[in-house]
Image: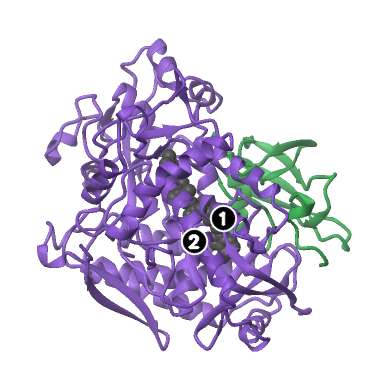
Amino acid sequence: MNVTLVVCRGTPGDAPREERWTVPFEPGQSVLDALRWIRSHRDATLAIRYSCTNANTCKECMVRIDGKTAYACTARLHEGTMRIEPLPNKRLVRDLVTEIAPPNERLSGV
Amino acid sequence: MPVDTVHLSTDVLVIGSGGAGMYAAIEAARRGRRVILVDRSLIGRGGATVMAQMTVAVGLEEGGLDHPEHHYVDTLAAGRGLCDPAIARLLCEEGPARIREMDAWGVGWAREDGAYKRAFAPGHDRPRCVYVDFLNTGPAVSKTLRVQLNRIPEIRRVGDLLVTALALRAGDCVGAVGLHLSSGRTVSIAAGATVVATGGLTRMYHRNSASANMMGDGYALALAAGAELIDMEFVQFFPIGHLAPRLVGMDPIMWDPFRYKLGGRLLNGQREEFIDRYGSKDEGRYIVTRDVATFAIVKEVEAGRGSPHGGAYLSFEHCSEAELRAAGGPVIDRLAANGIDLTRQAIEVAPIAHYHMGGVRVDASMATRVPGLFAAGEAVGGANGANRLSGNAITEALVFGCAAGASAAAQAEAGATRADASAFRGETDRLREGNAAPDFNPAAMVEQLQATMQDDVGPFRTAASLERALARLGALRAELSSRKPQTGRPYDGALADWHDLHTMTRVGECVAAAALARTESRGAHQREDHPGLDDAWRVNQLLTLERGSLRIERHATPQ
Ligand SMILES: Cc1cc2nc3c(=O)[nH]c(=O)nc-3n(C[C@H](O)[C@H](O)[C@H](O)COP(=O)(O)OP(=O)(O)OC[C@H]3O[C@@H](n4cnc5c(N)ncnc54)[C@H](O)[C@@H]3O)c2cc1C
């Protein structure tokens, strides 16, 4: 099976741009699986944030998927097109990565 | 477009915010020190601690049921003669104090009639393991420590900071240098004492239970700074890690509780029982030991009798829905959400890299041989020897974290040498140099490295496989050297991958070289060309870096 991911990319200064990738998948695979596949097979510069990968315990991979906020690690892939965007209510860092750390856990002054 | 380095300074620097790092920070602050606690991910979320689901081993005397001495005896037996008695003893003797302190902080250990509930786990002579229901031990431990951190103004927390080198002055550790991922800035931190609490290395393997941040950073950092590593050949594999169908929202070691409660049947690709071909029994009960199960599954796959994804089947099809529900509780619903119905289908399992016994060599105060440098948690080697008892890793993180925090506080008080700019310049310059646009895919190279480690430095090794791995790791390292991406871009995953590859090629070399040198089989290190334990090998191997080359020395295990 294949899915087309439309991913919104860019850094705060840039005009946001969309990129599309067709990704093969097996039923049950997650959006995070597809984003990791893109990094190792197409474009390693795609920025995503995650740690635990499978367990849904780190809670770091939250993004917008087809207009809804979700964890990329538990959202399933489906055939057709899926649109992935960074969280709209957090400061954009780059591509799908936003500043989600509590303010007192950031490096201030940068 | 490199920009200026950000400079910070503190009494105690703690690198890594799992159970060990958070406890170290709290203890150093309790002793009156200013602390900076950094993590390459978000604070308290990046490593193994938050992922642990099961149990914590501790010899609690309450009710006359247990004693640290019994725990110690079991720990030494599991370590197959290679434990460092001083630090194994510390783990067992201080365990109860840490578990009770976590209790006072509200972690919520499961209780029955007011007393701690204690679960039985393999290798322990009695029920010894506390836990937080349901499968919530790691998240509860992590959250409890985060709440304590929040209450202490002397602890400054900085996430998204990947430490890339320790800073040295005249051979002493005087802080560290890192890359602030979300800004792309280089950061230097001057510290009176530094604690490495970066966790283990299992992400180096293709099949693992690791987070993205567990690839042995602390081993590489400490080795480069002049510290010794010990027991690097001992990587613990968990035999029945989840393999297929794809299961998300659960960590892959989740089948153990089902096995304890329901047994379950291990079947090969032809749906035959096979454990009895390898000198053990399965019979639907969970009695086969981890090493035999791992060996049997690997051998069936090699013989072409694996399951479709290259493992074995684990079947609970003979169990009723009610039995499964009683054993799994809410997990049954999460399986259903993944389209998995255990009454109708067997799932596939395979051995996965799960924990690393080896690590930075320390004494019982968690001091390395480098003045000013301490280590804690899974980053430390020696407590568990050739094999770890289940439940000892969280205890070790809390106990060693506390001990390292106390020692680092004392060291910082003694007025350790202060860093000057020259201690940092070499690394900040190195970080900034490189190519503006990388012309290769470092994320793909990470996968190649993981395949090499899995295939050739996995649970079963031969001289030929280890030599092949060393050659491959050397080639990858050579390929990397000319291709470093430049710093300066926010959240540059390719640069982080490059750095991770640099680390993993070095740490992988440590594991493979130590495994090649040890010509016997013991605990988690199994040489197919040298089966069986050899008494002459009751020694630890110490690794050091000398003029850029790895050196291995044998050292009689202290008794
Ligand atoms: C899925 C899973 C389940 C487990 N279940 C159990 C169990 O039930 N019982 C048990 O006793 N043990 C269990 N273990 C093992 C146990 O969880 C770990 O050994 C223990 O939590 C390690 O704690 P730590 O603080 O040393 O490291 P970790 O918790 O791994 O923390 C290390 C931290 O260091 C950070 N870091 C790494 N490198 C750098 C760097 N270069 N710069 C900055 N930061 C860095 C990481 O991001 C991470 O946050 C389990 C492990 C896993 C993976």
The disc at residue B427 is none
Asked which secondary structure carries label 2, the reply is: helix
Q: Is disc 2 surrounded by few (<14), some (14 to 19) or many (20+) residues within 10 Å?
A: many
Q: Colour of chain B?
A: purple
On the image, which quarter does residue B119 sit in?
A: top left
Give me the chain letter of mark 2.
B
| Disc 1 to disc 2, C-alpha distance | 8 Å
Q: Which residue is at a point 43% across and 35% down the rendered structure image?
A: B54
Where B541 sits versus B157, above or below? below
Q: Which element type, helix, strand or loop, lies under badge 1?
A: helix
Q: Quadrant of residue B549 in the image? A: bottom left
Which of B477/A79 is in front?
A: B477
User: Which of the 4 quarters of the picture holds residue A9?
Assistant: bottom right
Q: Position of residue B303 (x, y in %)?
A: 21, 46
Q: Is residue B433 above or below residue B102?
A: below
Which residue position is annotated with label 1?
B27
Residue B469: give x, y in percent of width and height.
33, 69
Residue labelled with disc 2:
B404
Residue B440, percent from left and from top: 59, 71
Horizontal arrangement in the rendering, residue B279 relative to residue B207 (left or right): left
Whether residue B387 appears in this view of the structure is yes
Is A42 displayed left or right of B48 in the figure? Answer: right
The answer to whether residue B248 of the structure is visible from this angle is no
Q: Position of residue B347 (x, y in %)?
A: 39, 31
Shade of chain A as shown in the rendered figure:
green
